[in-house]
Image: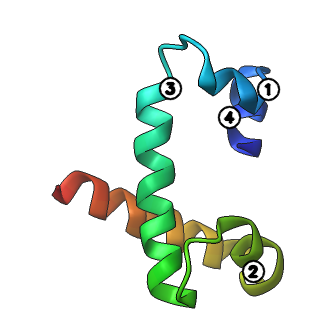
């Protein structure tokens, strides 16, 4: 959600409206949640980011893995 705001300037709640980015961002979030659930046992992206992913490279690895998963389906 933070990346969405940083990239677009729109608040995350706008994803609930008729926004052309809604579906792609939803798909990305689902893929990231899948990877996080595999790592920590629950799809809690905020906790994983704030408490478990100590180095930025770890967060990048999660996103890259989610990208591979997203494109594999």
> Quadrant of the rendered structure where residue 10 is?
top right
First in sequence: mark 3 vs mark 2: 3
Q: Are marks 3 and 2 in contact (CB under 8 Å)?
A: no
- Residue 13 lies left or right of residue 25; in this view the side is right
Q: Work out how far the residue at label 1 is from the one at label 2, CA to CA, in angstroms.
A: 26 Å
Q: Which mark is residue 11?
A: 1
Q: Residues within 10 Å of mark 4 (few under 14, many from 20)?
A: some
| Residue at (73, 28) in percent of width and height | 13
Residue 58 percent coordinates (x, y): 62, 79
Q: Position of residue 2 (x, y in %)?
A: 77, 44
- Could you tell me which secondary element the residue under label 2 belongs to? loop
Residue denoted by label 4: 4
Q: Please identify the quadrant where the N terminus is shown.
A: top right
- Which residue carries the number 3 mark? 22
Camera-nearest residue between 59 and 28: 28
Per the rendering, the mark at residue 55 is 2
> Label 2 near label 1: C-beta < 8 Å?
no
């Amino acid at each position: 959600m933070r990346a969405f705001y940083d990239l677009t300037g729109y608040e995350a709640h706008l994803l609930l409206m008729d926004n052309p980015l809604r579906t792609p961002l939803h798909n990305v979030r689902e893929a990231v949640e899948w990877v996080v659930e595999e790592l920590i046992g629950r799809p809690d992206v905020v906790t994983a980011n704030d408490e478990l992913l100590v180095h930025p490279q770890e967060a990048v690895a999660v996103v890259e893995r989610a990208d591979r998963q997203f494109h594999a389906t």
